[in-house]
Amino acid sequence: MSFDLGALLHAHRGEAYPLHERYLNPQLAKVLTTLGFDRTYVRGEGAYLIDDRGGRTLDMLSGFGVFALGRSHPVVKDALHQALDADLPNLAQLDCALLPGLLGQALVERSHPGIQRAVFTNSGAESIEAAIKFARCATGRTRVLYADHAFHGLTNGALSLNGGKEFRVGFGPLLPGCDPVPFGDAHALERELQRGDVAAVVLEPIQGKGVYLAPGTYWRKAQALCRRFGTLLVLDEVQTGMGRTGRLFCHQHWGLEPDIITLSKALSGGYVPVGAVLTTEAVFDAVYSSMDRAVVHSSTFSRNQLAMVAGLATLQVLDDEDLVAGSADRGAKLMATLAPLVEKYELLHEVRGMGLMVGLVFGPPSSRPGRARFRMLELARKGFFSQLIVVPLFHRHRILTQVAADNVNIIKLLPPLIIGDEEIDAFVSALDDVLADATKSAGLLVEVGTTMARNTLRRDRHRPGGRARSRT
């Protein structure tokens, strides 16, 4: 008897949310159902998700940046078919396979001259874990600094560098010697580095939880301070890398030369999980210092041949389709098209970002009635206003976005790098429509409240155990 994926999907159609509620994460299923986000997607094409009713949803989230090439890119898909058909001798472990070497070479050659080595991982968080280990080993120090508001992953070490307190609750004590510094404050950084015990400063070039940016002067000063005090500069390019901000690596905007670079997400092409840690030769040689330490840090699946093929194909597509430069152009178009809405609506305070990593910042209007309504929403739940934008964007206009972080009124946009004028214009038009209602009256609050109430009742009628769910 053979495995038949189509038959399996058909036989269990409509069971996704009940299965998640019973066997996986019922709280996530509850949140998505309450918001009415519980669509049944059956296919992904470029910048769109297609549901079981043929509806097309514009994906301005791209899997948190994973689908930089768009969904189902034909080149990556074909490369993986070739790899499967080749019956590659995968994960022999006691060997040095060709494809990891080729991907390592490709990444090193695209980095600054000081980067000479690559170590593969399975995720961004795992890349951060490796960076912490490597920095401590290479410097003989234990302290690691990170920025407030930072997000580097949710495994134990990565969580120790997480600026979001909501992620830490219940998981302590975390790694000792991990201390925050204000993002963008070179003087505060210098005070900590002067102690002479800091192994590494781990920073996102643009903070994903809020799309917070620091000026170029800060970055150049931070690098100089790290060099001065013998501290390694680790830049987390898990979300900002692979062309997201208009350069292959975001730190290239400021001419930086970090000691360690962490990658993942878009490197996968959207198919096979993969991550990488790029290091200087000095850092690498301190870790892998002898034959006895040849496997002192490794991961079973890290050099998976399919992941290597996905990474190589992704780099090929970035080059062939000139997507890095395209990201700069598309990002400039998106920001320019959004700019008039800042003038038009007092609720929209700022549009910020780089390339196709954009934050929409909302806040109270200057008019007294509007300010009162906004504050009332904030009393109900801090950051609730941004949900009043995300939900109707999805239901009215079939556009998927996300609130940038808990308790903030910022929406983050991470569209695929292949996005075109049609998608940009559709998004800006939809945002204009939703903001017009948000400005006029409390109608948007009623709309979202009604949606949530209706979906809560629907959710409660369809508890785990049923085979099908009705949907709005």
Image (spheres, rainbow, N blue to C red):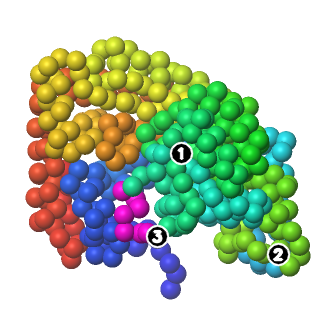
Q: At 40% across and 73% down in the image, what residue appears?
A: 8
Q: At 36% across and 64% down in the image, what residue appears?
A: 169
> In the image, which residues are magenta?
166-172
Indicate whether residue 176 is drawn in magenta.
no
* Chain-order first, disc 1 or disc 3: 3
The answer to whether mark 1 and mark 3 are in CB contact below 8 A is no
Label 1 and label 3: CA atoms lie apart by 19 Å
Q: Is residue 216 left or right of residue 358?
A: right
The residue carrying mark 1 is: 181
Q: Position of residue 266 (x, y in %)?
A: 59, 48
Against 137, is 202 above or below? Answer: above
Q: Is residue 335 left or right of residue 9?
A: right
* Res. 130 image quadrant: bottom right
Q: At 50% across and 86% down in the image, what residue appears?
A: 1
Q: Nearer the viewer, residue 204 or 403?
A: 204
Label 2 and label 1: CA atoms lie apart by 34 Å
Q: Nearer the viewer, residue 223 or 298?
A: 223
Which residue is outermost to the front? 195
The residue carrying mark 2 is: 293
The residue carrying mark 3 is: 173
